[in-house]
Amino acid sequence: MYRASQSFSIFMGDQVNDYLAQKRKALQKTIERIKAEDFLELDERDLINDLVERFKVDAPIIDFENITISDYEKEIPAVQFPQTFYVRPGKSYLKQVVVYHLPFRGNVELFRFTPSNFMLWSPEVYIEDQNVCFEFVNFGDMEEIKREAQRSIDAIKFFSNALLQDVGSYDAQLRGNVEQMVKARKQKILDSNNMLAALGRPINSNSFTFGLRQNPFGGGAKAATVEGEIKVKDEVGGSSVKGVRELAKQANTSKSTQRLRVFLCHSSGDKPQVRDVYKRLTAEGIEAWLDEESLLPGQDWELEISRAIRSTHVVIVCLSQNSTTKRGYVQKEIKFALDEADKQPEATIFIIPVKVEECDLPDRLRRYHTVNLFEERGFEKLMRALRSRADELGLTLTSI
């Protein structure tokens, strides 16, 4: 990208199904946080309709029929020119940049999630004026630009359709899920009331909050509050769903507890040493990905490994004389990790080469500072780097 610094690989990020699972949890949390006595006074149909409206997903829809193009001029460094051009090293030259604009509507944030059906490549894009934009430098071959642009459009269309299928499935089940959760909560409240009534004493409605000694939101029996008092009864005494929207907003925006995710890239011959690293990392509260522990029977292992690398916070490349001289899938993993590292912001700790024994460092990893795990305090140095990455992401490591 030449115009925008905030470019990203579209549809490459956390799994959208994980995002949708968090939406379901937030829905359940919202329902559970309404006070019991208030819950029984709400109109059930209005409550269900409001929750469906609040928790549906506004998936981005791209208008592929109305793609437009524009251009601007930019100084392009000599290093980015094709080899067929005669340019002076270190110089820049003014060239035309062609921009493709794909208009869309919907939630832009979902462009950063990966659908369940995906490819291993997607184009670099940026968002501008409700358009997904990508661009090419015109080095004189317009046919090449057309071919690459169509390749990018086809990839975006593939991902977009896959995302819409995932979100569509969630939305199709949403009303049924809401109805089931609401009815289950109501029945549990009624069962609890019947149990208390069987004890033969009046129920103290001022303190009864369905399993809690005090109202977690504060206020009396006729209010459910998050910030201040939100009335459940309106002025004419009819039922309403005021307060549910604020609860939904709070539950929906609260961050779930996450652990630092680490992918262990290694050669099969180094499995004993890597198992030890895996155990020590998990003991430190880290979510480590190791093939023999994380892969399920029947899964496409190559697909799952590429997915795990793409969604991880740190890739630890375990190196030995065996792994640095052996050809095989470990080299493919390293290449894929390096491609992901290129997408990270500068100074981000994403790849950590870890020597489990004395060995030469591959050329592609020489720019990264190495940890010698076989030396004294080697694991301690590794943990310092991981804690630094966790701090950067706002995560806390908690030893088990």
Image (tube, rainbow, N blue to C red):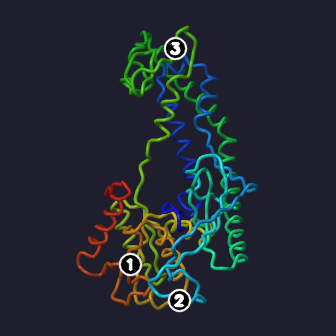
Residue at the location (50% across, 19% down)? 38
Which residue corresponds to mark 2? 327
Q: Is residue 110 above or below residue 289?
A: above
Q: CA distance from mark 3 to mark 2?
A: 70 Å
Query: Secondary structure under badge 1?
Result: strand
Q: Residue 341: image x %, image y %?
A: 46, 71
Q: Which residue is mark 3?
A: 233
Q: Which residue is mark 1?
A: 353
**Which residue is pictured at 52% across the width and 29% down the height?**
245
Q: In terms of sequence position, does the residue under pointer 3 or pointer 2 come before the other?
A: 3
Q: Is residue 106 left or right of residue 222?
A: right
Q: Amino acid at mark 2?
A: Arg
Circle count = 3
| Residue 231 versus residue 188 in the image, above or below | above
Indicate which disc, 1 or 3, sits on the residue closer to the N terminus: 3
Question: For the point 63% across and 75% down, which residue is it?
Answer: 138
Q: Please tell me whether mark 2 sits on a helix, a strand or a loop.
A: loop
Residue visible at 62% across and 65% down in the picture: 71
Q: Position of residue 260 (x, y in %)?
A: 40, 60
Residue type indicated by callout 1: Pro
Amino acid at dot 3:
Lys
Which residue is farthest right? Answer: 65
Q: Quadrant of the N terminus?
A: bottom right
Instruction: Check if mark 3's residue and mark 2's residue have beta carbons within 8 Å.
Output: no
Name the element at disc 3: loop
Task: Give the quadrant of residue 199.
Answer: top left
Given the current orientation, which residue lies at the most extreme left position? 376
In the picture, the quarter occupied by the C terminus is bottom left
Q: CA distance from mark 1 to mark 3?
A: 61 Å
Spatial distance from mark 1 to mark 2, Cα to Cα?
Answer: 18 Å
